[in-house]
């Protein structure tokens, strides 16, 4: 029996360094607070790629990375997982970083300082060797940056129709230029976001209404709305909305849950799984990810 070849996942998202601090609550304006614990780790699109690698996917990082201590961290982490890097390091900038506050209920709040990963150019994108059956991942961070956003919006629609594009608008969805967001969303085969992001894109408070609204803007093949501990909504083109529950596990830290979901979803698609099965696998991976950190 022959098995279909696993397709490659090409990431044009932003790999950054995460500074994560666990705090009992966010400080009031002008206030201060002592973190119970902190850690420094590579994150952003790296979490998506790591989740895909955990599932056995072949992954290539085509995003920008800087020259400096944070860029070194990104490259070391990518090499450790066997992820190929296409672009050489940027010579004038380090990789950016994100500060994440994790409160007692496991929820996250972010502040980001962009670096080399925000400087994807049209020339750099055009130089990426994309095969006809690749999966391409694009994140809202890249779309929100003033330089890389318009470049991605121009590049994505020029990819062959056989290339599967998966987009995740991320927390900065409201900061993305409308023309950039529309162009990227329209080219994506799959659009995946959480409830907040879906609400910001559609104005609909109810997840069922928001996923229908998203389907009018994005996802040639379908749209996913992640519901945290309640699982995920899936709306495939021409089908009814399906709600897929998540395993019931204790939440320790929701950092990277959406990334784990998206990376696993793409890896499953790359391996030939149906969208329904891919979402089920993604729900399990996300639930496991949020229960790991104490």
Image (cartoon, rainbow, N blue to C red):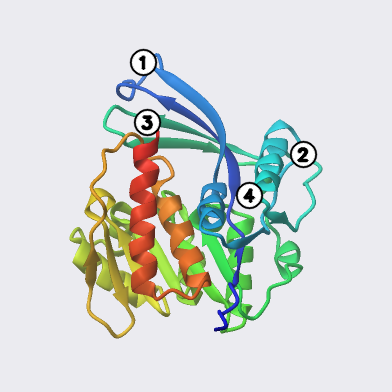
Determine the secondary structure under disc 2. Answer: loop
State the residue lying farthest toward the front: 1
Rounded to the nearest whole Å, what is the CA distance between mark 3 and mark 2?
29 Å
Q: Residues within 10 Å of mark 2 (few under 14, many from 20)?
A: some
Q: Quadrant of residue 21?
A: top left
In the rendered structure, find residue 183 and report the number of the disc placed on it: none
- Closer mark to the observer between disc 4 and disc 2: 2
Q: In this rendering, is residue 109 above or below 155?
A: above
CA gap, disc 3 to disc 4?
24 Å
For the point 20% across and 58% down, the residue is 205
According to the image, label 4 marks what residue?
A: 118
Return the residue at label 3: 102
Q: Mark 4 vs mark 1: which is more N-terminal?
A: 1
* CB atoms of marks 3 and 2 within 8 Å: no
Establish if 274 lies above or below 21: below
Q: Nearer the viewer, residue 155 or 207?
A: 207
In the displayed structure image, the side of residue 97 where residue 235 appears, left or right = left
Disc 4 is placed on an element classified as helix
Please say if the residues under marks 4 and 1 sit with CB atoms less than 8 Å apart.
no
Q: Which mark is residue 67?
A: 2
Front in this rendered view, residue 116 or 228: 228
Location of residue 288 in the rendering, given as x and y in whole percent from the top left corner: 36, 46
| Tag in front: 3 or 1 | 3
Labels 3 and 1 touching (C-beta < 8 A): no
Pointer 4 and pointer 2: residues touching (CB < 8 Å)?
no
If you read the primary sequence from the N terminus, does the residue marked by circle 1 or circle 2 appear first? 1
Numbered badge on residue 31: 1
Left or right: residue 69 versus residue 191 is right
Of callouts 3 and 4, the N-terminal one:
3
Structural crowding at the residue carrying mark 4, measured as other residues with C-alpha within 10 Å and reported as few (<14), some (14–19) or many (≥20): many
Give the mark nearer the N terminus: 3 vs 2. Answer: 2
């Amino acid at each position: 029996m022959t098995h279909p070849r696993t397709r490659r996942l090409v990431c044009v998202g932003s790999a950054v360094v995460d500074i994560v601090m666990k705090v009992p609550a966010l400080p009031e304006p002008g206030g201060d607070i002592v973190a119970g614990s902190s850690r420094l780790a590579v994150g952003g699109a790296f979490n998506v790629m790591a989740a895909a690698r955990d599932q056995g996917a072949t992954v290539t990082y085509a995003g920008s990375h800087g020259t400096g201590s944070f860029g070194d961290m990104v490259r070391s982490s990518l090499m450790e997982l066997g992820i190929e890097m296409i672009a050489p390091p940027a010579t004038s900038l380090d990789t950016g970083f994100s500060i994440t506050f994790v409160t007692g209920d496991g929820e996250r709040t972010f502040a980001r300082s962009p670096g080399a990963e925000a400087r994807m150019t049209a020339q750099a994108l055009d130089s990426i060797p994309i095969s006809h059956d690749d999966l391409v991942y694009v994140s809202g961070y890249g779309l929100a940056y003033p330089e890389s956003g318009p470049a991605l919006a121009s590049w994505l629609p020029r990819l062959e129709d056989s290339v599967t594009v998966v987009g995740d608008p991320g927390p900065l969805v409201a900061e993305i230029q409308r023309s950039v967001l529309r162009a990227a969303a329209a080219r994506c085969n799959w659009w995946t976001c959480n409830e907040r992001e879906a609400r910001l894109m559609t104005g609909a408070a109810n997840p069922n209404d928001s996923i229908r609204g998203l389907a009018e803007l994005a996802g040639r093949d379908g749209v996913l709305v992640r519901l945290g501990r309640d699982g995920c909504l899936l709306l495939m083109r021409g089908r009814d909305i399906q709600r897929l529950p998540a395993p019931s596990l204790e939440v320790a830290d929701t950092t990277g849950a959406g990334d784990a979901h998206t990376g696993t979803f793409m890896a499953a698609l790359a391996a030939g799984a149906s969208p329904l099965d891919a979402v089920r696998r993604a729900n399990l991976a996300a639930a496991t990810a949020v229960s790991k950190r104490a």
